[in-house]
Amino acid sequence: MSFDFDATVVGAGAVGLACGRALAKRGLAVLVLEKEPHIGQGVSSRNSEVIHGGLYYPTGSLKARFCVEGRRALYAFLDSHKVDHRKCGKLVVATDETEVERIEAIFVQATANGVEGLEHLTGAQARALEPGLNAHAAILSPESGVFDSHGYMLALEGEIGEAGGSVVVSTPFERAEPLPGGGFTIIAGGEGGATLTTRLLVTAPGLGAQAVAARIEGYPADRIPAGHFGKGVYFRLTGKAPFERLIYPPPIPGALGTHYRKDLGGQAVFGPDLAYVETEDYSVDAAKAAEFEGYIRRFWPGLPAGALTRDYAGIRPKLHGPGEPQPDFQLHGRDVHGLDGLVALFGIESPGLTSSLAIGEAVSEMLAHD
């Protein structure tokens, strides 16, 4: 039978757009559906805009592989599309002797993951690079950086359009039903919305991953992983940015923890922390500034009192709750849910932005023979 589209992607964040681009590059007629009025309004617009080196993730995991592959591809993409970015490098800092063993474990992990250019630094060497830093020892990751994530997503959208595909906003996914001979019927657009057919379907809606999967007829409910909202807030510094490089203390349980970046506008931003919430609440409690000050002074003792102002919050689509081990990305194909022509993505949090091009290529490969 003929279809309206070869492939439909649910979600026009960085990962959904990267999936759409990869499928369009194969010559497929692609449609990307987005419920918000603009692309990249969810997880993709509320993060640190950091290009991760790939240091922390278990060797052989999707996170480790996609982060390193995605980061290499991302720099090339940003260069070729003239998207603003800065390969500033990152210092993972042990602020005292008790943290040295933890950062050494990160060095070993990163080396196993194939991260390039890593260096051990003494405290004196780290302070020579970044005066004012409290460092007993540090690891330098020169491949880490920051970039304009929205400019990146606009470039992805542009490539989809150039290939003849479409990105349609203000069009929520309602439900999908498998067709007897393969493919899907999709209802989208809310009240009075459209019905369309597609041969292939990719779901990449970030925080809505579980809800979208549940609205696909025949998707086994017991194969939809439980989701959790991990909220993190950011504070901005009033005054001159103290460091040129990214500064990361050792990770906290379940996340990388509150770190420092100098954004592309030259301002210093700290965050995110991690708190589990039940709803999409993006408020930032100004009272948290005191907690942030105490944490930041571990690596920047010179932080002036009262210099932090609340900035923004993001929510990450986590697959683990408080105290649980952090799981890998999940890309569900036919072997998981039993439906031909469908890939559903779950738990695409950090380093999902850095990994997005690699995730898109992997999804495209999974569907290449469907």
Image (cartoon, rainbow, N blue to C red):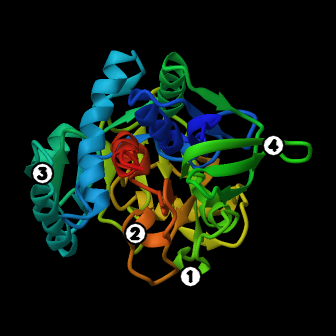
Q: Earlier in the sequence, mark 3 or mark 4?
A: 3
Which residue was labeled with disc 4?
A: 189
- Determine contact: label 3, label 2, CB under 8 Å: no
Residue hosting label 3: 114
- State how far apart marks 3 and 2 are (Cα): 29 Å
What kind of element bears circle 2? helix
Q: Nearer the viewer, residue 23 or 278?
A: 23
Label 3, label 4: how far apart the Cα atoms are:
44 Å
Q: Which mark is residue 222?
A: 1
Which of disc 2 and disc 3 is earlier in sequence?
Answer: 3
The residue sitting at 29% across, 49% down in the picture is 67
Percent x, y of residue 368 = 36, 45
Callout 1 secondary element: helix
Identify which amino acid the numbered label 2 is placed on.
Asp
Q: CA distance from mark 3 to mark 1?
A: 35 Å
Please state the horizontal and vertical placement of residue 364, each as a whole percent of the image. Answer: 39, 43
Helix, strand or loop status at disc 4? loop
Q: Is residue 212 left or right of residue 345?
A: right
Circle 2 packing at 10 Å, graded few (<14), some (14-19), many (20+), is: few
- Could you tell me residue 296's position as x and y percent? 42, 57
Single out the residue that lies furthest toward the right. Answer: 192
Q: CA distance from mark 4 to mark 2?
A: 30 Å
At label 4, which amino acid type do we have? Answer: Gly
Q: Which residue is mark 2?
A: 335
Q: Nearer the viewer, mark 3 or mark 2?
A: 2
Question: Image check: 179 left or right of 264?
Answer: right
Tag in front: 2 or 1 = 2
